[in-house]
Amino acid sequence: MSKATVSASTSAAPKGPKGVYDDVDHSEAPGHGNSPAAWTCVIVMLIGALIASIAFVIANTPIFVAGAAVMVIGLLAGWAMRKAGYGVGGSKLKNSGH
């Protein structure tokens, strides 16, 4: 057996302003997407996934495609609601501090 030692470099993190790595600013919290647009998008897409999953189990292709279409509709609904001001920090939301 070899008795060679292995050493690791101590400068693994890039040098730069605090919280900035690889040109991405990590100093701000990303948030959780807690908005009516996000909730609508997720709920509609979950319903579509449920429809597609059940259709997959019973081997029904038209219903499976319909479930996939519902998922796309959910994505579009979330996008449209965000553009209408119901996304995070949107103009139609009253920020209550939480």
Image (cartoon, helix red, strand yellow):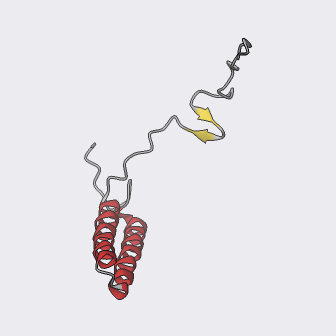
Q: Is residue 82 above or below residue 15?
A: below
| Residue in front for this viewpoint, 18 or 86 | 18
**23 lies left or right of 32:** right
**47 lies left or right of 83:** left
Residue in the image at 29% along x and 76% along y: 51
User: In which image quadrant can residue 64 be found?
Assistant: bottom left
Image x and y of residue 84, in percent:
39, 69
- Please, which residue is most extreme toward the front here? 1
User: In which image quadrant can residue 23 be found?
Assistant: top right
Image x and y of residue 25, in percent:
57, 39
For the C terminus, the image quarter is: top left
Residue in the image at 28% along x and 80% along y: 58
Residue in the image at 30% along x and 61% along y: 39
Q: Is residue 82 above or below residue 71?
A: above
Image x and y of residue 73, in percent:
38, 77
- Please, which residue is most extreme toward the bottom here? 62
Residue in the image at 69% along x and 26% along y: 15
Image x and y of residue 1, in percent:
71, 16
User: In which image quadrant can residue 78 be found?
Assistant: bottom left
